[in-house]
Image: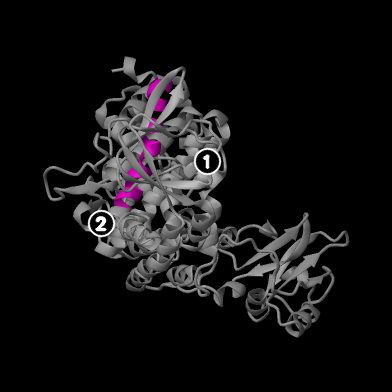
Amino acid sequence: MANIISSKIADFIIRFPPFDKVAREEIIRLSEEAEVLYFKKGQLVFQQKEKAKPFIYFLKEGEILLNENRDKKKVLIDACDEGELFGVRAMLTGNPYVFEAFCQEESLVYAFPLSIFKPILESNKDLSLFFAAGLASGQKPSGFQAIYQQNKEAGGADFLSWQRPVEELSEPLICVKPTVSIEEAAREITAKSSNALIVKDEQGKAVGIVTDTDFRAKVGGGIALISDPITKIMSIQLISKELGLPLAEYVISMLKQNVKHLLITKNEEVYGIFSQQSLFSQLQLNPFSILYSIEAADSLEKLCSYRNEVASFLKYYLQQNLKISVLSQLITTINDALIKKAIKFAIAALEEEKYLKPDVDFAWISLGSEGREEQLLQTDQDNAIIFGEVDAAQLNYTREYFIQLGRRVNDTLHQAGFEYCPANMMAGNPDWCLTISEWEKRFQGWIRTPEKQALLMATIFFDYRYIYGDQGLVERLDKHLKTEIKSNRIFLNYLAKNATQNPAPLSFFKNLIVERSGAHKEDFDLKGRALMPLADIARVLCLEAGNITIKNTVERYLFLAQQDKSRKEVFIDAVQAYELLQHFRASEGIRNDDSGRFIPIKEISKFDRQVLRNAFEPIYALQQMIELKFQLNYFN
């Protein structure tokens, strides 16, 4: 009889997420140990603040309400329907229950022992992802990250574990004194089969680094003689990192700084050298190879073809569950290299066509998702140009030159797979190719007269990020923006109001709200209803806190979590939700060969629907928070 009951339990639960992702034999083992509990209408399965029981609960029949007792009132948090889990947070953290589980009607509940359930959870990637999305009726377990990380690190042997701390180095550490000759140093580096050495002064302080490239380029190129001291060919720009950081930090630093070697320290003492050579044997679809191919491209055709390799790179690492914040930084670095190379090609082409380059500095800035370092897929481009002040007589020619430059770069990016902006918010548009004083006036107008169109412009342009040219122009715009917002605080109320205008992702009955007309009828707008609200709220809160330099949404929420400890939990929840939604959008975009913005609801599984539904929880919490913070109920 026991076998028949457990078999029926298994047949039932395997129909529902996350059990539909679990092997049949594990479902059977779990079902054999399950307790079947019956509750009358009005009974409690557990009470708020009650010590956690060694079970996770699954609702077979009936309805369970999760209530929170606040100021002697019961506040409905969620309603569990057939096939849903509850008691998750207490299960993962060991803390008391944060809600009470009240039986709204007669209910039949399966109680699965944690002694059986947890080992299955820890060994199953899909099961961990389910809880990493903050599932089981909106209870966001603070302990899921460790479990999720274990699964990622236990992945295939061909996958580089980006979050694994680097605790030792394979490169031998070679240190020489400044007086050593180039010839002596070359012999030592050859004897130890290394490709770099450190130059230390008499006090033992690292003062320079010499790589195999330095020997080839500077000695072979006739810049130095082999009898010269090693200091003649050393680089003094040392980029150092402490030992023990996640591998991803070393990779991103090397990409951003465009170097092949990092100086590694331990307790502030030189420990060794970390080089790309140690990565090449581990990485598939190496980001360095794509980056260097772009930088070395000698034609637009090659430049664009190299950038197109990123689609394969993105697909591979999404499948390997590489952390989205790491992946977005890698792709941003590659995109930035593409833009810089496209600008250089455009300047050279204009010169060939006898366009005289104006004697004035300029800066190229990226806007929107690229400005926030969040453009994983090749969606549309948003960019602009800032150039310095010139005499009135030179202004028209100068502007025309930079417009032509902008259009050529826009065309190159389009050729590389980035669509033209439908609203023409691109550097080749005269409206977005302005002098620094014109940009200051434009920003000032949006802030002082925050009409609907001005607020739309602010949400796009206030995420600007320096890419190329004179960074001083961008820093001047930063100071101006900060001063204007500080002097016109009412603008933040308008911006906050605007951040709450996107319709809720879910209906009252927790169904995903889909488009009712147009080309995407019956599709869910993942960008408009989920990602944009989170990005908009992060922006207004950071501007309110006086931080205009952080543009990335995840980094903004992490900054806010540090600044406001009382709301730290909701900001961390927002980080997790945003990364998960970005991952989902990128995966769908690759699968459907589009931007991933509109999701065909009929084509996604119940598991994915539930992942999405529960990732929306921070949106509601944040919208309620800013409504109170900016008193939006009294603000029209």
Identify whether 321 is placed above or below 615.
below
Label 1 residue SS:
helix
In this rendered view, identify the residue nearer to me: 533 or 68.
68
Residue 631 rendering spot, x and y as whole percentages: 38, 18
Q: Find the residue positioned furthest to the right.
A: 202
**Disc 2 designates what residue?**
604
In this rendered view, identify the residue nearer to me: 4 or 28.
4
Taking the magenta stretch, the answer to whether it contains residue 409 is: no
Q: Confirm whether residue 392 shows in the render.
A: no
Q: Tell me the tag on residue 558.
A: 1
In this rendered view, identify the residue nearer to me: 207 or 405.
207
Identify whether 28 is placed above or below 615.
below
The residue that appears at 41% across and 53% down in the rendered structure is 130
Q: Confirm whether residue 324 shows in the render.
A: yes
Q: Which residues are magenta?
A: 608-630
**Cα–Cα span, label 2 and label 1:** 31 Å
Residue 37 rendering spot, x and y as whole percentages: 40, 44
The residue that appears at 30% across and 57% down in the rendered structure is 15
Crowding at dot 2, Cα within 10 Å, few <14 / some 14-19 / many 20+, comes out as: few
Tell me which corner region of the image, top left, top right, bottom left or bottom right, holds residue 377. bottom left
In which quadrant is the C terminus drawn?
top left
Please name which of the two marks, 2 or 1, marks the residue nearer to the observer. Answer: 2
In which quadrant is the N terminus drawn?
bottom left
Q: Find the residue positioned furthest to the top.
A: 634
Q: Amino acid at mark 2?
A: Ile
Q: Amino acid at mark 1?
A: Leu
